[in-house]
Amino acid sequence: MAVEDLMINVYLKRILNKYHIDTKELKFWSTKRVVNLVGLFQNIDGRQLGKMDLIAVENEIRRVPNVKDITFKLKHWQKKNNEWVEIKEE
């Protein structure tokens, strides 16, 4: 793993902790300066976080030095036409 990716991962951990995101349910890593977030986007108390929380976290990650892109594979959220859309379970 490149040193840049290690530093990005340190920033990611700080950002996710700042927003009290449950990292047991949301996996995150960086490969070749691309951040990957996979799983549930929820608070450590189990409360699903909202669209504004997601936008804030995304914006903060994009400001991390050396981040080239972000890939999201979230259970209840999907990005369509540059807009976050909540996916309702039926």
Image (spheres, rainbow, N blue to C red):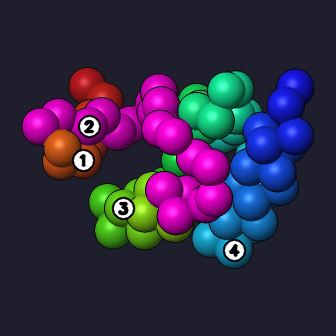
User: Is 77 inside the magenta-drawn segment?
Assistant: yes
- Mark 2 = which residue? 79
Give the Cα distance between marks 4 and 3.
14 Å
- Mark 3 = which residue? 55
- The total number of labels drawn is 4
Amino acid type, callout 1: Trp
Q: Earlier in the sequence, mark 4 or mark 2?
A: 4
Amino acid type, callout 4: Lys
The answer to whether the residues at label 1 and label 3 have Cβ atoms under 8 Å apart is yes
Q: Earlier in the sequence, mark 4 or mark 3?
A: 4
Boundaries of the magenta span: 61-81
Q: Quadrant of residue 10?
A: bottom right
Amino acid type, callout 3: Ile
Quadrant (top left/top right/bottom left/bottom right) for the C terminus: top left
The answer to whether the residues at label 2 and label 1 have Cβ atoms under 8 Å apart is yes
- Mark 1 = which residue? 84
Give the Cα distance between marks 4 and 2.
23 Å
